[in-house]
Image (tube, coloured by chain):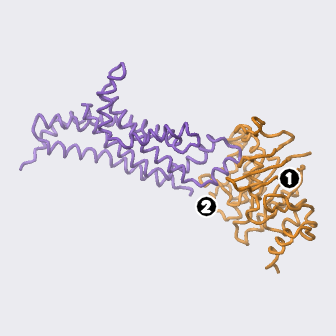
Amino acid sequence: MTVLRLAGLVKRFGANPVLRGIDLTVERGERIAILGASGSGKSTLLRCINFMELPDEGRVEFGGQVVGSERDGRRRYAERELTQIRRQVGMVFQHFNLFPHMTALGNVMEGPLTVLGQDRVQAEARGRAELARVGLADKADAYPAHLSGGQKQRVAIARALAMDPALLLFDEPTSALDPALVGEVLGTIRALAEDGRTMLLVTHELGFAYHVASRVLFLADGLIHEQGTPAEVLKEPRQAATRAFIASHKQFSL
Amino acid sequence: MRWDFATVIEHADVLAIGAVGTLRIFAICLVLGLGLGLPVGLGRYARNPWLRAPATAFVEFFRNTPVLVQIIWFFFALPILLPFQIGPLTAAVLGISLNSAAFSAEIYRGGIQSIERGQWDGARALGMSWLQAMRRVILPQAIKRMLPALANRAIEIFKMSTLASAVAYVELLQQGKLIASLYYNPIEVYTAVAAIFSVILWPLVQLSYWLERRLKGGE
C-alpha cells in the first residue's frame, strides 16, 4: 500500500530553488534514510511532506488522495486540509520542540487531548503507554527542563506516536545531542522500525542508515541524486557526489 | 504651617465614595484595555494586510495621543457626531481602555513573537489549528514573559483613572478636589489621595510578584 507519493515537488525560498523536482513513492513499512550535505534540501523535503512548508510546484499524494486543489494553474491548499494531513504524519525535530510548560506526560497527551478530542482518562492512558514504549514511564511528571537531551527526544517521539501516525518524519533527530546520548534515541527509532512503522529519516548517522533503513536516498542540489538499498548507496555509490559525501563522513571514523 | 488632616478624616466618607468610583473605572478599563489588546496585538503581526493595517493604525493613533485629550474628546465631541449622550464614565472608559489596548497590544505582540519558532512547529506538526496552537502552546508561555509588563500596565491604568476627573467622574481625585475647594486644605487632601492610591496599589503589586513567581514553576 502506498502511503505517500511525491511528483515533481519544487520548493523555492525567494529566487533560490531548494527542491528542484522530487519524485518519491513511499510504501507502507518502508524506512527511508535521506542523506545529503547541509543545504541539499533534506529538511525542506520533510517539511513539505507535512506541509510545514507549502511546495511551489508538484503534487503530494497522501493515502491515495492528492492534497490541495488546482485553481488558475496553481495548486491551492486549504489550511483545514493541511491540518488533517499533519494529524496523520508524526514529526520529530532536531531540537525536540517539546512544550516546556507541560510535563513529559502532558506533552504526549496534548495531541490526543487537544487535536483528537479524547477525554483526559483516555489521553492519559495513551500518553503513559507511549512513554513506557520509549522507556520513560518513570519520567511522566518531569518537565522538559529536567530531562536530558536524549530523554527529551524520546518524549518527542512518544508525542508523535500518540497520534497514531501513518508516517513518521525524523528531521536529524540526533544532531543536537551529546554523542553519549545518541545511542538511546537511535535505539528507540530502531525499535519503531522493527515494529514495521513507515518512516522517513534525515540523518548524518551513516551506520544507523545502513543497518535500519530499507532504502537510502542521497539528495544533492534539491534533487534525488542517487537511491537504492543501503548496501548499494553506502557501499558502492555510483555517483561521484555520493562517494565524496560518504568519504567526508568516514574521514575520521576508526 | 499647620497640617489639618482633621477635615480630611471627617470627610473620609466622601473619599470612600471616590475610592469606589476609582476601583470601578479601574476594573472596567483593566478588563477592556488588556482584553482588547490581545486581538489588536495579534492583528499587529498578522500576515493578512487587512488585519495588520487597521491594528497598526489603531496602535499608532491611540499610543500617540494623550489620554486626557481622548477623554475630553469622547465627552464633548463624540455626542456631536453620534445621536446619543455620553456620560463621564463612558468617556473616561473609552479613553483609558483604548489607550491601554494600544499599549498592551504591543506587550502581547512582543510576548508572542518572543516564543521560538520551534514551538509553533511542534504544535502544528501535531495537527493543531492556529487557534489551538495559540491557546495551548504559545499564549501560556508568552503570558509568563508578558506578566511583568502587563502588571505595569495595570498599575498605569489604575493611576490613569484620575484623568476621569477632567469630565467630573466621581473618583478619588475628583472627591479630593471637592473637599479641598470647600475647606482650602489641598495639601492635606492630595497627600491623603496619594496615600490611598499607594495603599490600594501595594497589594496589587505584591499580587503581580506572586503571580510571576507562581507561573515560573515548571520551567
Q: Which amino acid does label 1 sit on?
A: Arg
Q: Callout 2 environment at 10 Å: few (<14), some (14 to 19), or many (20+)?
A: some
Q: Position of residue A184 (x, y in %)?
A: 77, 66
Q: What element carries label 1?
A: loop
Q: Classify residue A151 as left or right of residue B67.
A: right
**Residue A217 position by quadrant:** bottom right
The mark nearer the N terminus, 2 or 1, is 2
Q: Where is residue A4 in the image (x, y as percent from the top left)?
A: 85, 47
Q: Callout 1 environment at 10 Å: few (<14), some (14 to 19), or many (20+)?
A: some
User: Given contact means CB atoms under 8 Å apart, are the residues at marks 2 and 1 in contact?
Assistant: no
Between B37 and A77, the residue placed more toward the observer is A77
Q: Residue furthest left?
A: B1
Q: Position of residue B45 (x, y in %)?
A: 54, 45
Chain letter behind tag 2: A
Between A119 and B189, the residue placed more toward the observer is B189
Distance CA(mark 2)–CA(mark 1): 29 Å
Q: Residue at x 81, y 78 (%)?
A: A253
Q: Position of residue A142 (x, y in %)?
A: 64, 58
Chain letter behind tag 1: A
| Colour in which chain B is drawn | purple
| Colour in which chain A is drawn | orange
| Above or below, comparing residue B93 to residue B4 in the picture | above
Identify residue for label 2.
A145
Q: Which residue is drawn at 75% across and 43% down?
A: A87
Q: Is mark 2 on a helix, strand or loop?
A: helix
Q: Which residue is drawn at 90% across and 66% down?
A: A233
Q: What residue type is labelled 2?
A: Ala
Identify residue for label 1.
A197
Q: Classify residue A165 as left or right of residue A97.
A: right
